Image (cartoon, rainbow, N blue to C red):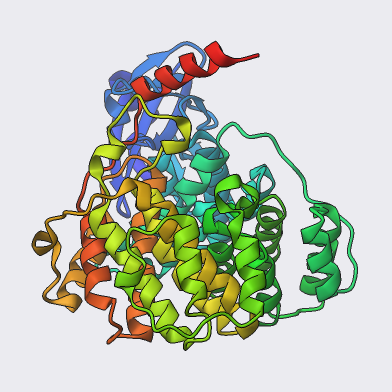
């Protein structure tokens, strides 16, 4: 429906440009190369006025702030990304009439999701934010953007699930509890941006298409043999038949703990996938399960490394009964990998809660005593490229392992011994003295509230850092809720406090150069 502007063609041609305001819109009328055009006056990039732009040949208008260029006829961005809205023009009686009717909700949704795809490919966080905001303004659930991004980029995850998915459920929870629209939007776009980061420049690695009836034993065998295509066909059958993830979780948990897999990521992802499916719904279920399956199939099996080879022997000895010696965290501190496995075996017949508490306490001690100098050196061996992130997994893995064992009690020996591996492997990188009083948490609720609030404006340029922060806080909340009076509770709060408020060096240019020269020198 066209509306009169009360602006004549001759008047516009004399002035060449005119900004009018209608229904909350700023519309720029331009007389250019014999035509009359109506466009949104705000540049879709950062909102600067296009009325201050420069016209060029071929119906092109340039925004002078960042040199974005638009086709006045179509609104297409010729330089830049976001398209410019145009309005149909009709001339009647020498006067300019405009059609100001808005696109349908479906059209707005399609445009926002198409723009989201471009933003994800460009790893453009500001545009991701704009497109998610546009989707919500059009009346749709902003979580649709996360689902669309997962479907769009899932096959570009060569090794399957990453932290982008692993932390997404925590970010969605933050969005639900946000106190302002800005914080809510931030928590919604963080996992999308992380997915964009993780898939930037990646080729597509399609998943197998076959489908067969779900068979738990067949799935486990396929994963163990690293036959991804076979495992995927079982997953497609489970989704086809509507099998809930709660029923699949014991199987995924078993495959995740079958090995000391991928530095604990497999177990963490097996738990977080279920939470993410709950929050996003059935549309996200298949792509998430495909990514999870691929990540478990391809996971490193670190118990095969020389330093962890006593793990398999420890499992066998556990099955033989083990000892009944009482155990606390102090019994495990500063032990080597083999030493801590041996000490845990001496207590294998003690209550599971006692073993778990001892290992959690030792992990908390490590967090409090991580030697920050380790993260700064540039002349170390590649095997000693250890940072805060390595220490964080002792908590996030422990939380995931405990939840898996809640549905598969027979996995507790594996879970507890793998917790011991995390504690033992970090012994090399701690110092015995630490300013524990500085990090003491006197008000647990206030501490968690403060650090949760800080996530909305964390300031970390790398998504992986923000991801570990949100996962650490989430895991701590989960474990404190499960056991608020646990003997490790105060120590773990202090350790997480130190982790969250200590520097993390992420650019190791000199270390990289030194290790490259050493590697090439020794190359055969």
Count of number-bearing discs = 0
Task: Tell me the residue at 13%/76% (across/down).
Answer: 443
Q: Is residue 273 above or below residue 94?
A: below
448 in relation to 13, above or below: below
Q: Quadrant of the C terminus?
A: top right
What x and y, as percent, mark residue 289? 68, 63
Quadrant of residue 217 within the rendered picture: bottom right
**Relative vertical location of residue 446 with respect to residue 104 in this rendering, above or below:** below
Which residue is drawn at the image coordinates 81% and 75% (left, top)?
Answer: 216
| Left or right side of 239 for 71 | left
Q: Quadrant of residue 477?
A: bottom left
Q: Nearer the viewer, residue 482 or 274?
A: 482
Q: Position of residue 271 (x, y in %)?
A: 55, 71
Nearest the viewer among 361 and 460 is 361
Q: Give the image location of residue 93, x and y in percent.
A: 45, 36
Q: Residue visible at 32% across and 80% down?
A: 480
- Residue 85, horizontal then vertical, whole percent: 46, 40
Q: Is residue 41 left or right of residue 138?
A: left
Image vertical order of residue 367 relative to residue 251, above or below: above
Q: Nearer the viewer, residue 512 or 57?
A: 512
Residue plotted at (39% across, 84% down): 326
Nearer-the-camera pick, 10 or 290: 290
**Horizontal arrangement in the rendering, residue 387 relative to residue 308 (left or right):** left
Whether residue 359 is visible: yes
Answer whether residue 182 is visible to the viewer in this image: no
Horizontal side of residue 141 vs 190, given as left or right: right
């Amino acid at each position: 429906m066209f509306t009169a502007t009360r602006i004549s063609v001759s008047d516009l041609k004399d002035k060449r440009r005119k900004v009018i305001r209608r229904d909350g819109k700023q519309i720029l009328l331009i007389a250019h190369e014999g035509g009359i055009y109506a466009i949104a006056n705000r540049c879709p990039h950062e909102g600067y006025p296009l009325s201050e732009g420069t016209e060029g040949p071929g119906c092109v208008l340039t925004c002078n702030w960042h040199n974005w260029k638009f086709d006045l006829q179509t609104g297409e961005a010729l330089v830049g990304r976001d398209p410019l809205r145009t309005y149909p023009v009709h001339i009647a009686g020498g006067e300019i009439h405009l059609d100001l009717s808005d696109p349908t909700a479906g059209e707005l949704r399609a445009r926002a999701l198409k723009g989201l795809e471009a933003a994800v490919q460009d790893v453009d966080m500001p545009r991701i934010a704009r497109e998610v905001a546009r989707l919500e303004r059009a009346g749709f659930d902003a979580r649709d953007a996360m689902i669309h991004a997962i479907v769009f980029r899932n096959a570009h995850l060569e090794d399957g699930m990453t932290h982008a998915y692993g932390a997404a459920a925590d970010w969605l929870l933050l969005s639900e509890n946000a106190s302002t629209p800005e914080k809510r939007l931030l928590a919604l776009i963080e996992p999308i941006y992380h997915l964009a980061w993780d898939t930037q420049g990646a080729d597509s690695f399609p998943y197998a298409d076959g489908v067969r009836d779900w068979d738990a034993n067949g799935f486990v065998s396929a994963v163990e043999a690293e036959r991804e295509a076979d495992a995927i066909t079982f997953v497609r059958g489970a989704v086809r038949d509507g099998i809930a993830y709660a029923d699949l979780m014991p199987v995924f948990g078993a495959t995740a703990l079958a090995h000391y897999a991928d530095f604990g990521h497999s177990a963490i992802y097996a738990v977080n996938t279920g939470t993410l499916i709950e929050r996003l719904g059935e549309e996200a279920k298949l792509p998430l399960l495909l990514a999870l399956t691929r990540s478990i199939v391809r996971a490193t099996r670190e118990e095969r490394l020389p330093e962890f080879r006593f793990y398999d022997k420890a499992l066998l000895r556990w099955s033989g009964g083990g000892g009944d010696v009482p155990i606390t965290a102090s019994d495990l501190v500063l032990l080597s990998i083999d030493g801590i496995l041996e000490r845990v075996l001496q207590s294998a017949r003690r209550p599971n809660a006692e073993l778990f508490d001892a290992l959690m306490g030792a992990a908390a001690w490590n967090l409090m005593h991580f030697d920050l100098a380790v993260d700064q050196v540039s002349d170390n061996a590649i095997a000693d490229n250890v940072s805060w992130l390595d220490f964080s997994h002792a908590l996030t893995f422990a939380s995931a392992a405990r939840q898996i064992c809640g549905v598969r009690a027979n996995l507790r020996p594996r879970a507890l011994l793998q917790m011991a591996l995390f504690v033992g492997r970090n012994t090399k990188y701690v110092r015995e003295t630490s300013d524990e009083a500085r990090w003491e948490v006197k008000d647990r609720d206030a501490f968690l509230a403060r650090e949760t609030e800080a996530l909305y404006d964390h300031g970390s340029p790398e998504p992986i850092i923000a991801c570990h922060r949100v996962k650490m806080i989430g895991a701590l909340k989960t474990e404190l809720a499960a056991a608020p009076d646990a003997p490790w509770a105060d120590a773990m709060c202090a350790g997480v406090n130190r982790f969250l408020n200590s520097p993390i060096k992420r650019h190791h240019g000199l270390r990289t150069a030194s290790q490259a020269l050493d590697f090439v020198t020794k190359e055969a």
